[in-house]
Image (tube, rainbow, N blue to C red):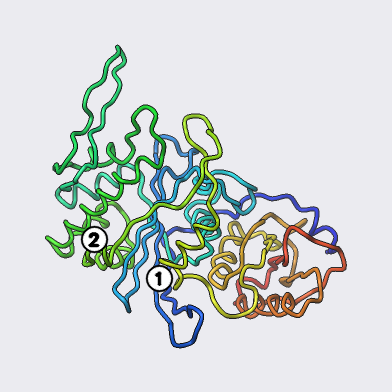
Amino acid sequence: MMLWALLLIGAVGLGVLVAGSPLVRRSSSLGDSDNKREQITYLGIGLDQTNPDAGAEWATLFAFEPDTGVGFGLFVPTTTLAEIPGHAFEGLGKAYTYGGAALEKITVGNVLGVAIDGTATFDRPALAAFVDALGGLQVNVPARLNRRLAGGGTETAFEAGPQHLDGARVVELLNFRAEGQSELDRFPRAQAVWEAVFARERAAAGSLEAGLDRADVPDKSFAALLASLARLEPGNTMTFQSLPVRSVGSGGDDEVYQPDKTAVRSLVRAHLAASVPSGGAGVGLRVQLLNGNGIPGIGAGVAEQLQPAGFRIVLSDNAPNFEYAQTAIVVYSEDKAILAAARRIRDILKVGHVEVSRLGQSVVDITVVIGKDYPPG
C-alpha cells in the first residue's frame, strides 16, 4: 500500500463489539511507586428500545477501589460533544448508534482519559425488570415533579420524598423531564434511584445479582461491583458527581454541552486517577485504525487493547482493500518517543511492523493498518 493513501482515508465507525468486556483489574501509579491503587470501572448505558437510532439516553460510570474501599458514580450527559472515533464531534450518546457499547465505552474513556473495564446495557424494559426483581425500590424523590396536561394546567407526576416505586415508575422517574428542564436536572433523581438500589442490596444481600439476571445482564463482575458499592457509606466513601460541562446551545429539545477540561482533569485526579493509564510509551498519543483484513468490527477489538495502554483512538475506517497480509504501524516522524510508542503497539497486538512515513500528518500520531496476521493465531 502507498503510504500517502493513509492520509486520504475518511472516517466511519469502529463496528460493534459485544458489550460487557471481561473484567480487568488495573494497578496504576499516581506519581510515585509507593502510591499505587487498584480500581474497577464499569459504564452503565441506558437505551430507549422504541428509538434505536437515538443512541444512549443515559450513561453512568461506576468505579470502586478494592484496596481503599472508595466508590464513585459519575453521571455523563449524553449530549456532551465528544470526539467519537470515526464520526468527528457529536453528542457522545450517539456513539452507541454507530458502534454499540464498545464505541460508547471508548468515547467516554477518551473524554475522561481513563480506561474503562466493562459495560452493562439496559433498555427500558430491562431496567424495569431489574427493579421489579428487587421487589421495587424505596426512592427518596428529591423534588415534586409536575407534568403539563394536553388541555392546559398541570398534574403531579411524582411527589417529593420517600416512596415505593415499581420498575415502570422508576423508568418513568429516570426519564422524566418537566418543561424547561435539561438532562442535568435528571441526575439528582438518578442518584436517588441508585442509592435505593444499593439500600436494597444492603437489606437483602444477593438481590442485585438476581435482579441483573432478570434484566439479562449476565456479567457477574458488574453485579459484584454494584454490591461492593452498596456496602459503602453514602456521601463519604461512596459519592456521586456529574461530568463538569458547559452549555454551548441547544440541539432540538436538548441542551448541548462541552466538557470543562480543567474541571474534568481535577475530577479524574480526585476520583479516577487509578484508572488513568500510566507508564509506558504512547500515553495520550492519537491513533487511527484502518481495517485491512475485512473482519467486521476488528477496529473495536484493537481499540479495546490500545486504549487501556493510554492511546487515544480518534479515527477509524476501512483500508483501501482487505488484503493486507501483515499489520502496519505507521508513524510520521522519527521522534524517539513516537517510535517507542509504535513498538509498544506492536508488543500489545503481538503482530505488525513499524514503518516511517515521510508525509506530514497533524491529525494523528500513529496509524495502524490491521492485517490478516491479526488476531494472532
Residue 88's tag is none
Query: In the rendered view of the protein, which quadrant contains the N terminus?
Result: bottom right
- Mark 1, residue position: 23
What residue is shown at x 55% (from left), y 59% (from top)?
110
Q: Residue 250, position in %: x, y?
A: 53, 33
Eyeballing the image, is 131 above or below 309? above
Q: x%, y% of residue 301?
A: 56, 64
Task: Mark 1 vs mark 2: give the one in front.
Answer: 2
Q: Earlier in the sequence, mark 1 or mark 2?
A: 1
Instruction: Tell me if residue 277 can be seen.
Output: yes
The C terminus, quarter of image? bottom right
Residue 221 x/y as whole percent:
33, 68
Three-letter amino acid code at the position of disc 1: Leu
Vertical arrangement, residue 339 with respect to residue 288, above or below = below
Instruction: Give the residue at the far top of this rendering.
Output: 151
> Relative to 67, does residue 87 appear above or below in the rendering?
above
Q: Residue at x 22, y 59 (%)?
A: 208
Tell me the distance, in whole angstroms, between the alpha carbons under discs 1 and 2: 25 Å
Going 36% across and 45% down the picture, which residue do you hit? 123
Judging by the rendered image, the residue that carries numbered circle 2 is: 234
Q: Residue at x 44, y 76 (%)?
A: 26
Q: Secondary structure at mark 1?
A: loop
